[in-house]
Image (spheres, grey):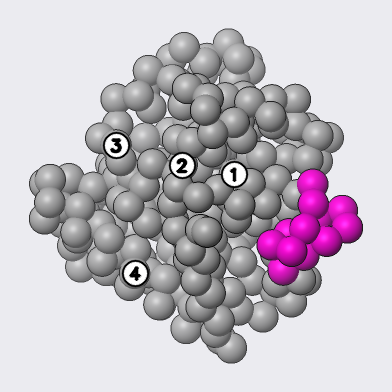
């Protein structure tokens, strides 16, 4: 059975501090082991406090590469750009020395830029040292959205694709995302959620109750390759 460990906090600032400490430890381990480190983070509003804590952690950030788990296909000038948020909240203070590798390229669609983006991401120094996932109210994680046009391919543990475009009714813009097998190639996998509603969604997904049986996050919880550490606060 897959190891899933849960860490609950009454204060989301305490969660942010604890999670930042664990991620920083994994980055330091990577730096000590191979002289470089690779971190994948999620966008949205949930990780802001975590980013602010992580940005102040002392380590050799100049040897760390940071990527997003997924991205909306919008330029960094757009208010919904995850890259914009990562640069504003994470790549500050000590972490300003890190090297950020963006998904977005100057093309009208993610499909049009797929060859370029795949080459860019294939050049990263895998495995990840840490991957931090989030979860939406519809049970999506990364850009694994219910009804996504390439959802089955993205979740296929035998698949060889590193990166895929994704379009779904609940996604808003077209997206681009690492696939599940790509994200599982990590030294540490974290799932960061906040709020009572998301805690229930996650619990239902773990148990396979009702419509939660179809939540894409369940694929992360059911896989047996990589242990998952869940960090939650109300």
Report, in whole angstroms, how far the alpha carbon at label 2 lies from the one at label 4: 18 Å
Compared with 46, 169 (above or below) is above
Report, in whole angstroms, how far the alpha carbon at label 1 lies from the one at label 4: 21 Å
Say which residue appears at 63% left-offset and 26% top-offset. Answer: 153
Q: Residues within 10 Å of mark 1 (few under 14, many from 20)?
A: many
- Whether residue 185 can be seen here: yes
Residue behind mark 2: 183
Name the disc covering residue 126, or none: 3
Q: Which of marks 2 and 4 is nearer the N terminus?
A: 4
Residue behind mark 4: 22
Residue 213 forms part of the magenta stretch: yes
- Whether residue 68 can be seen here: no
* Residue 106 drawn at (x, y percent): 51, 18
Q: Which of marks 3 and 4 is nearer the N terminus?
A: 4
Q: Which region is colored magenta?
A: 203-214
Secondary structure beneath label 2: helix
Q: Which of marks 1 and 2 is nearer the N terminus?
A: 1
Report, in whole angstroms, how far the alpha carbon at label 1 lies from the one at label 3: 18 Å
Secondary structure beneath label 1: loop
Choose between 65 and 140: the one closer to the eye. 140
* Residue 124 drawn at (x, y percent): 30, 31
Residue behind mark 1: 142
Q: Earlier in the sequence, mark 1 or mark 3?
A: 3
Report, in whole angstroms, how far the alpha carbon at label 1 lies from the one at label 2: 9 Å
Residues at discs 3 and 4 in contact (Cβ within 8 Å): no
Residues at discs 1 and 4 in contact (Cβ within 8 Å): no
Residue 183 forms part of the magenta stretch: no
Choose between 191 and 185: the one closer to the eye. 185
Report, in whole angstroms, how far the alpha carbon at label 3 lies from the one at label 4: 19 Å
Say which residue appears at 52% left-offset and 16% top-offset. Answer: 114
* Residue 222 drawn at (x, y percent): 61, 52
């Amino acid at each position: 059975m897959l190891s899933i460990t849960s860490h609950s906090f009454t204060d989301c600032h305490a969660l942010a501090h604890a999670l930042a400490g664990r991620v920083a430890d994994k980055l330091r381990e990577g730096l000590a082991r191979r002289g470089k480190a690779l971190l994948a983070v999620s966008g949205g509003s949930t990780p802001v406090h975590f980013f602010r804590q992580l940005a102040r952690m002392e380590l050799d950030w100049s040897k760390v590469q940071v990527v997003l788990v997924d991205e909306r296909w919008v330029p960094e000038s757009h208010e919904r750009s995850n890259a914009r948020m990562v640069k504003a909240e994470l790549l500050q203070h000590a972490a300003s020395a890190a090297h950020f590798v963006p998904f977005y390229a100057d093309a009208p669609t993610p499909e049009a830029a797929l060859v370029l983006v795949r080459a860019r991401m294939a050049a990263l120094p895998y495995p990840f040292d840490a991957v931090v996932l989030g979860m939406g109210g519809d049970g999506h994680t990364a850009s694994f959205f219910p009804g996504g046009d390439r959802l089955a391919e993205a979740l296929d543990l035998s698949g060889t694709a590193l990166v895929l475009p994704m379009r779904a009714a609940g996604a808003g813009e077209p997206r681009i995302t690492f696939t599940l097998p790509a994200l599982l190639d990590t030294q540490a996998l974290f799932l960061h959620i906040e709020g009572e509603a998301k805690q229930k969604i996650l619990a239902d997904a773990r148990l396979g109750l009702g419509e939660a049986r179809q939540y894409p996050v369940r694929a992360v919880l059911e896989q047996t390759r990589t242990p998952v550490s869940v960090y939650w606060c109300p």
